Image: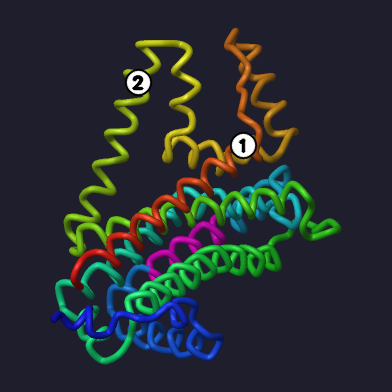
Amino acid sequence: MSADARTAPGPESAAPRPGILRVLFRIEALKAIRRPAFLVTTGIFAAFNVIVAINAVRMAARRPNVNFALPDSWPEILQPPANIGPFFLGVTMILLFAPEFSWRTARQNVIDGLSKERFYTGKIIVLASLLGLFLVLPMAIGSVATLFSPSESGSPLVGPEDFNYMIACGLGLLLWGSGAFMLSALFRSSGPAMGIMFVYLLVEQMLSQLIAQASESLRSASDFLPFATFTDVIDPRLHYPVRLAQENARRAEQGRAPLEFHDFELLLGAMLAYCAVFLAVAFASMRKRDL
């Protein structure tokens, strides 16, 4: 009988108790801070945000017409990390999760008494923690940077549109993180998982072009492919009507069709559905396969 079978949990252990969640968080935190991959990826991401914030402060100091203050500058603070942050989160998730299979630490955890469900829950905690880190870090760095800007802040510091954009940035992180979670569980190696993640981006873009050329009716369906949905959700023009109006005014002057987006609620539902599928596939793979 395999170690997985001997340690398979009963129905009563499927849902981790609050005390177990604290233990799992402590275990995963200790693993992460000892991994150079985690420190390097988060360090590079933090440095990227610092550079973006410094450039914004310098630009506001040099050009009187440039405003870098809250709440007006939330799009400038969040858009750069919204574009690159999900990539860093996906890579970090793969580097923290996938090697546990090739290094046999996942199997050893189960042999030591940790059920597959709790091992999976531990990785969900990693995903949630990374999501919070990669969302809060640019917000904190950008907010501090505005204190050094000559621009005057308004009130309130966060408006409804800004709040929606923050939710959108979090959804983008969740989509990439859950996708990386699934690839880690399926391929169980960092190299193949990251390779498939990058290849998929190219495949989806080519597929979208083929669909658009083949049928106009199917073109709208291609807008709901994972990466296309992500691209629309993190676009500030979806959340800030003034920016969309300015863009459409420019397009009208150029004789181009106005830019249109699907409803945010519809895109939100699509992204959450993708995340649920990715996490469910990862769970099924971990339950059925020998660690």
Residue situated furthest top in the rendering: 255
**Answer yes or no: do the residues labelled 2 and 1 have beta carbons within 8 Å?**
no
Measured along the vertical axis of the image, is residue 66 above or below residue 42? above
Identify the residue position indicated by label 1 in the image: 266
What amino acid type should be assigned to the residue bearing mark 2?
Gln
The Cα atoms of the two marked residues, 2 and 1, are separated by 22 Å
Q: Is the magenta stretch mostly helix, strand or loop?
A: helix
Three-letter code, disc 1: Leu
Q: Which mark is residue 68?
A: none
Residue at image location 69% in from the left, 34% down from the top: 243
Q: What stretch is highlighted in magenta?
A: 42-55
2 vs 1, front mark = 1
Q: Is mark 2 on a helix, strand or loop?
A: helix
Q: Where is residue 94 in the image (x, y as percent from the top left)?
A: 29, 64
Task: First in sequence, mark 2 or 1: give its number.
Answer: 2
**Residue shown at 64%/19% (left/top)?**
250
* Front residue of 96 and 71: 96
Q: Is residue 94 above or below residue 270?
A: below
Q: Horizontally, is 261 left or right of 51 in the view?
A: right
Residue behind mark 2: 209
Q: In terms of depth relative to the viewer, which is nearer, 280 or 177?
A: 280
